[in-house]
């Protein structure tokens, strides 16, 4: 199509066509985004009873530094603002209000802890600011009908609890289960799933439920109480510090049940090593990420790339800590979400892109596990594989399972 000397294209002003092109490609921004920057908020327990998880924030910080060094996301640098909330819900509310109202972030990403995220859940949705890929597996994060601005990341605790229960029923003769549970939404979500998996006779199978508060110094007395019931299975629903204490105490008092432990405390560096390798033999957990201590992945290209990334961007960090693998994988998904937003960096489009993944490959997820979401499905990862601790590492066994296939 040729332009006449009067500047018309097919009877339409060339200026109008060019103007329309610019309008079509117009950039759209909400708070926290501009031509040069994307501002992301985060908080986590750099201090307090769950400080073992503080390395997640450090790992995510390293990831964004590496992204910025490579040119950013669609030409924009990521400004990652991370604050300490001490695993304290009241403090979490305080720092998140600071991130949203003062820093004016585009979204909050991977805020850690079930109690903390519960405390900001309604606030984030009332503000219509994305609360994305939260670092907790509580089932409540997958409720787009009532909370359209909140989405989880990891497999939900309820499903994980169901899977442990069904494995116990299939593999332990006359099971009598002693449970240690953190007394909050985190612990209760696992417990409800576990009871569902045991079925209508769960009251007969559970010998005793012992709880603890995150402010307690130790859980040693609870472990003694559980042993005294004669339980032959121990379900350890605890965060890293207390999970390690429980494993160590069980060994000290010569209690030798079949042990099941939640995925959130599966880090060899922050839980198993402090508990003692000898004391952890045979513990079963559920995995969805490749473990950096598992020699099975020694020649795996993704693991080698991650090791090289750690050497460059997290020098001196403990590569045996699976929390760094978690940080890398969840940051990759956030990176992909923002990349898919293009030049429309609005709160609504961030959530739209987060809810539009179809079998998205994420580095370091186990083979057979990918990320899928939709407007009605806010559970990005819904599968796990069981693994057993042997020697100084975890060994995978069985098939990849979801709640339905377990």
Image (cartoon, rainbow, N blue to C red):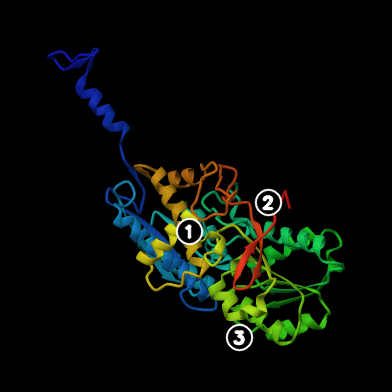
Q: Where is residue 88 in the image (x, y as percent from the top left)?
A: 53, 74
Q: Residues within 10 Å of mark 3 (few under 14, many from 20)?
A: few
| Residue 294, label in figure | none
Q: In which quarter of the image is residue 227?
A: bottom right
**Tally of numbered tags:** 3
Q: Distance between the residues labelled 1 and 2?
A: 24 Å
The extreme left residue here reads: 5
Q: How far apart are marks 3 and 1 (CA)?
A: 36 Å
Q: Is residue 28 shown left or right of residue 7?
A: right
**Camera-side residue: 123 or 396?**
396
Residue at screen point 56% across, 58% down: 289
Q: Which residue bears the numbered disc 3?
A: 217
Question: Sequence order check: which comes first, mark 3 or mark 2?
Answer: 3
Q: Is residue 208 shown left or right of residue 215?
A: right
Q: Is residue 220 above or below residue 124?
A: below
Residue at screen point 83% across, 64% down: 202
**Camera-side residue: 98 or 9?**
9
Residue at screen point 30% across, 50% down: 76
**Camera-side residue: 325 or 112?**
325
Q: Which residue bears the numbered disc 2?
A: 402
The extreme front residue here reads: 299
Q: Is residue 149 shown left or right of residue 249?
A: left
| Residue 303, label in figure | 1
Q: Position of residue 99 (x, y in %)?
A: 40, 63
**Element type at marker 3?**
loop
Question: Sequence order check: which comes first, mark 1 or mark 2?
Answer: 1
Quadrant occupied by the N terminus = top left
Question: Sequence order check: which comes first, mark 3 or mark 1?
Answer: 3
């Amino acid at each position: 199509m040729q332009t006449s000397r009067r500047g018309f294209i097919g009877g339409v002003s060339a200026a109008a066509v060019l103007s329309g092109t610019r309008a079509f490609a117009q950039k759209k921004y909400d708070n926290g985004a501009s031509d040069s920057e994307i501002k992301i908020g985060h908080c986590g327990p750099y201090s307090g009873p769950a400080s073992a998880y503080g390395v997640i924030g450090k790992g995510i910080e390293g990831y964004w530094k590496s992204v910025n060094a490579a040119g950013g996301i669609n030409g924009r640098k990521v400004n990652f603002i991370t604050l300490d909330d001490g695993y304290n819900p009241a403090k979490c509310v305080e720092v998140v209000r600071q991130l949203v109202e003062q820093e004016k972030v585009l979204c909050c990403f991977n805020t850690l802890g079930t109690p903390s995220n519960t405390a900001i859940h309604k606030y984030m949705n009332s503000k219509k600011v994305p609360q994305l890929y939260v670092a907790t597996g509580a089932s409540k994060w997958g409720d787009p009908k009532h909370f359209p601005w909140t989405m989880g990341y990891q497999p939900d605790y309820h499903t994980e609890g169901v899977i442990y229960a069904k494995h116990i029923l299939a593999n332990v003769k006359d099971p009598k289960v002693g449970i240690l549970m953190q007394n909050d939404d985190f612990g209760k979500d696992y417990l409800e799933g576990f009871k569902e998996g045991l079925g209508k006779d769960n009251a007969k199978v559970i010998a005793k439920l012992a709880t603890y508060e995150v402010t307690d110094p130790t859980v040693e007395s609870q472990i003694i109480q559980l042993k005294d019931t004669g339980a032959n299975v121990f379900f350890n629903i605890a965060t890293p510090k207390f999970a390690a204490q429980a494993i160590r105490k069980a060994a000290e008092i010569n209690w030798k049940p079949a042990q099941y432990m939640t995925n959130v405390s599966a880090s060899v560096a922050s839980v198993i090593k402090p508990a003692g390798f000898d004391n952890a033999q045979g513990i079963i957990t559920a995995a969805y990420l490749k473990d950096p201590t598992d020699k099975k992945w020694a020649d795996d290209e993704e693991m080698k790339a991650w090791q090289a990334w750690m050497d460059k961007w997290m020098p001196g960090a403990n590569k045996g800590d699976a929390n760094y693998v978690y940080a890398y994988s969840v940051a990759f998904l956030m990176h992909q979400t923002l990349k898919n937003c293009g030049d429309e960096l609005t709160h609504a489009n961030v959530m739209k892109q987060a809810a539009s993944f179809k079998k998205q490959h994420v580095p370091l997820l186990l083979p057979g596990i990918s990320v899928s979401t939709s407007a009605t499905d806010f559970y990005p990862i819904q599968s796990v594989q069981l693994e057993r601790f042997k020697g100084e590492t975890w060994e995978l066994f069985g098939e990849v399972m979801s709640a339905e296939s377990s």
